[in-house]
Amino acid sequence: MKRDFLQITDFSRDELFALFALCAELKAKTKARQQHHLLKGQTLAMLFQKPSTRTRVSFEVGMYQLGGHALYLSPAEIGLGSRESVADVARVLSRFNDGIMARVFGHAIVEELAETASVPVINGLSDLTHPCQVLGDLFTACEHKGRYENFKVAYIGDGNNVTNSWMNLAALLHLDLRIACPPGYEPNMNLLEKAKAAKKSDISIYHDPFAAIRDADIVYTDVWASMGQEDEAAARKKIFAPYQVNKKLLTAAANDCIVEHCLPAHRGDEITDEVIDGAHSVVFDQAENRLHIQKAILVTLMR
Ligand code: CP
Ligand code: NVA
């Protein structure tokens, strides 16, 4: 049976640790320039409804390094749901390819792709979640801190797709996850309830960023207006101003904290230059690890 990766919770806890082990192995091989053609001759169709730098490049380079090939399919070409139905696109791409990666607006689109494709479907970001990102982010945290669990994580800003994926992660392993957002910008309540019901983690919503960040090991932020919310950007800039990750806020976190951001960053809005370029920041390690974690995901699903 084929397997998809739409949410972090599609993996079990044991599978998650196996994935991280494979990621470390593939990263070491890549650094040593050792050939690892585990997907020789295979192809990945990459469907994009939104722009991308990291996701597109890391999947494309990753498939090449695994001995396969990736095809970039722009929004204009495919017209998911307008030129052709989502289901028909999934059926057709399954006849040519060994896997599909999709970046979409509505999460229902990746779900429909997964239901109708006969090959594995990977969520490369939807309005609901960004699972590849947050797995890479935890792998990065482990490289710096030597563990995958028992972190105090302060997510400061918009309760968005990245926040939702942190909550999914908290359903599988223990985190003290504190989310600070303005009232009305909380993460998805259904995923919050599910993560709480798993009883693995402590998850709290704050409206005071200073309370959320106290003694945090991982300080995380993301843009205040996600892709598709551009028309709200000016209003959000005012609402989110107290949630900027700056030097003053960071003094309340643990002295040895790491600062993460999925990028692209709006410098001077959700994060200052001083912090993103400062000693605590690991944002470019995170960007690089998108490559390694996604290669592990591709091998796990397609081999
Ligand atoms: N973090 C991330 O997914 O970046 P892109 O939008 O550039 O792919
Ligand atoms: N929350 C952001 C993440 C970008 C990688 C967005 O959806 O635009």
Image: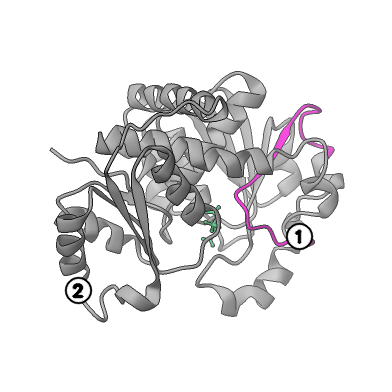
Residue 267's disc number = 1
The chief SS type of the magenta part is loop
Image coordinates for residue 223, horizontal then vertical, percent: 63, 60
State which quarter of the image contains the N terminus: top left
Q: Residue at x 48, y 25 (%)?
A: 34
Relative to 177, say whether 234 is above or below.
Answer: below
Q: Residue at x 70, y 32 (%)?
A: 216
Looking at the rendered structure, the kind of residue marked 1 is Arg
Does any portion of residue 169 appear in the rendered image?
A: yes
Ligand 2 position by quadrant = bottom right
Q: Specify whether residue 293 is painted magenta.
A: no
Tell which of 189 and 220 is nearer to you.
Answer: 220
Residue 85's disc number = 2
- Range of the magenta residues? 251-269
Looking at the rendered structure, the kind of residue marked 2 is Ser
Tell which of 137 and 270 is nearer to you.
Answer: 137
Please rate how many residues cluster around mark 1, counting C-alpha atoms within 10 Å: few if below 14, some from 14 to 19, many from 20: some
Does residue 31 appear left or right of residue 102 in this picture? right
Does residue 287 appear left or right of residue 257 in this picture? left
State the image quarter where residue 76 is shown: bottom left
Relative to 135, say whether 221 is above or below.
Answer: below
Image coordinates for residue 190, horizontal then vertical, percent: 37, 50
Q: Quote the CA–CA distance across marks 2 and 1.
A: 38 Å
Please rate how many residues cluster around mark 2, counting C-alpha atoms within 10 Å: few if below 14, some from 14 to 19, many from 20: few
